[in-house]
Amino acid sequence: MSDTEPPMTRFPVPDLEDVPEDIREHIEEETERAGFMPNVMRAFAYAPHQYRAFFDYHDAIVEHSPLEREEIEMIIVAVSGANDCLYCVVAHGALARIYAKDPLIAEQLATDHTAANINEAHRAMCDVAVKLTESPGSIEESDFERLREHGFSEQEIWDIGSLTALFNLSNRMATFADMRPNEEFYNLGRGGE
């Protein structure tokens, strides 16, 4: 992967100076926080109204969920792995490694969360997220009971479903548009940064 690879290949990537000011400011804030500009932001800027809606919904979950940030990233990686979404596995895999303080967790969750080195509560959480991804019609009350037995609150259970739904959308758009992960994501959370 080269430094000149575009953020996505199937749609034109807008120049930053051509996107609405509020989106440009959001991208600049995120770039400052991350230390580089995540490609997903430039890609989603192609459709400004959708950019706003997507990131507003993302932030509403991530910033206000009672789930721990490592749990949020674990769900995203397990779902993205089930959907074979390269962008989200790589980008959120980096965040999972950082928040879980575990350089091995991302690959384990993305390839087979059932074999990952995680506790039973997190396995139940990922089981439900992947089940909702792969066969949503098969979700039943026993899935909710299992989460409750592992101590998840009703709000946390709602957020597991909401996050799963959002990243099914995100995964499909990233794949559809051929969004490419930033090279920086590959090494984050591996102990060398």
Image (tube, rainbow, N blue to C red):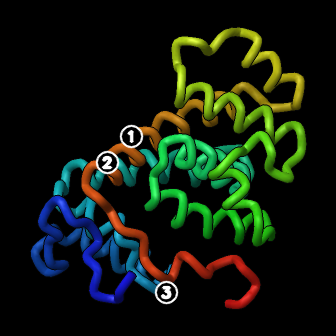
Nearer mark to the viewer, of 3 and 1: 1
Q: Residues within 10 Å of mark 3 (few under 14, many from 20)?
A: few
Please, is residue 154 above or below residue 141 in the view? Answer: below
Q: Are marks 1 and 2 in contact (CB under 8 Å)?
A: yes
Q: In this view of the protein, which residue sits in the foreground, 112 or 183?
A: 112
* Residue at 72 percent of width and 50 percent of height: 71
Residue 135: percent from left, percent from top? 54, 20
Q: Earlier in the sequence, mark 3 or mark 2?
A: 3
Q: CA distance from mark 3 to mark 1?
A: 26 Å
Mark 1 to mark 2 CA distance (whole Å): 6 Å
* Residue at image mark 1: 169
Residue at 89 percent of width and 45 percent of height: 119
Name the residue type under label 2.
Answer: Met
Residue at (54, 37) in percent of width and height: 164
Q: Which disc number belongs to residue 35?
A: 3
Q: Which mark is residue 173?
A: 2
Label 3–label 1 contact, CB within 8 A: no
Q: Secondary structure at mark 1?
A: helix
Q: Residue at x 85, y 37 (%)?
A: 121
Q: Residues within 10 Å of mark 1 (few under 14, many from 20)?
A: few
Q: Position of residue 181 (x, y in %)?
A: 42, 70
Q: Nearer the viewer, residue 72 or 107?
A: 107
Numbered label tally: 3
Query: Callout 1, which amino acid?
Result: Leu
Tell me the distance, in whole angstroms, between the alpha carbons under discs 3 and 2: 24 Å
